[in-house]
Image: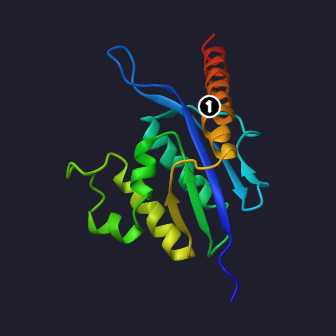
Amino acid sequence: MEPNPTFKLFIHSAGINSSRNSFPQHVWLACLESSNGETVWTNTSEPPEVLDGSASHVLHLAIRTTVDRCPDNCTVYLLSPQENIVAIYGVTRERRRQDRYRGSDKKRRPSADLIKDIDDVTEARGITLIGRKPQENHEYEMVDVRLRAEAESRWKDACAAADSDFT
């Protein structure tokens, strides 16, 4: 029996966090690579969309969107600069369910419903998600340099497009 194919999903976001004068808004960027380093899917050719919510919530939306582009019965390594993404998906789906989508502080995660949806969809399709930190030079380059720059560029483009809608 052949082993399940493996992929790497690099995700990043850019935007603003909440303050007294604003609420959190972000755009996301995702790049799904095959085990041989070929890009399977990315949203870079799609226009950026400003989404309400924290960076973590928007990254979960990126994961959910990308899961739809993954083949059934595969393993996907999630690589993100966000420690909480690595922590959430660094444990098994069963453990997340057992913990009732709560963090180490025993409080329900803000994106718990979205994480549960991701778990339900991936389980039905035989997809295993594993969060981990970058380990290879290419992975560091993707997460810390390339995707960060592209996400920030998408954020600027989205803001410029939104400004033109109001002029």
Residue beneath the point at 66% across and 15% down: 164
Point out the image quarter for the N terminus: bottom right
From the top left corner, tell me how far across and down residue 133 is, in percent: 52, 49
Height in image: 70 above or below 102?
below
Rendered image coloring scheme: rainbow
Residue lying at the far left of the rendered structure: 106
Height in image: 75 above or below 45?
below
Indicate the quadrant where residue 102 lies: bottom left
Lateral position of residue 51 relative to residue 72, left or right: left
Residue type beneath disc 1: Arg
Lateral position of residue 84 relative to residue 103, left or right: right
Residue annotated with mark 1: 148
Residue beneath the point at 57% across and 74% down: 125
Label 1: element kind: helix
Lateral position of residue 17 relative to residue 147, left or right: left
Whether residue 164 is visible, yes or no, is yes
Residue lying at the far bottom of the rendered structure: 1
Count the marks: 1
Lateral position of residue 72 relative to residue 88, left or right: right
From the top left corner, tell me how far across and down residue 41 is, in percent: 73, 53
From the top left corner, tell me how far across and down residue 45 is, in percent: 77, 39
Height in image: 8 above or below 138?
below
From the top left corner, tell me how far across and down residue 73 is, in percent: 62, 76
Residue lying at the far top of the rendered structure: 167
Residue beneath the point at 43% across and 43% down: 83
Q: Residues within 10 Å of mark 1 (few under 14, many from 20)?
A: many
Whether residue 70 is visible, yes or no, is no
Indicate the quadrant where residue 142 lies: top right
Point out the image quarter for the C terminus: top right
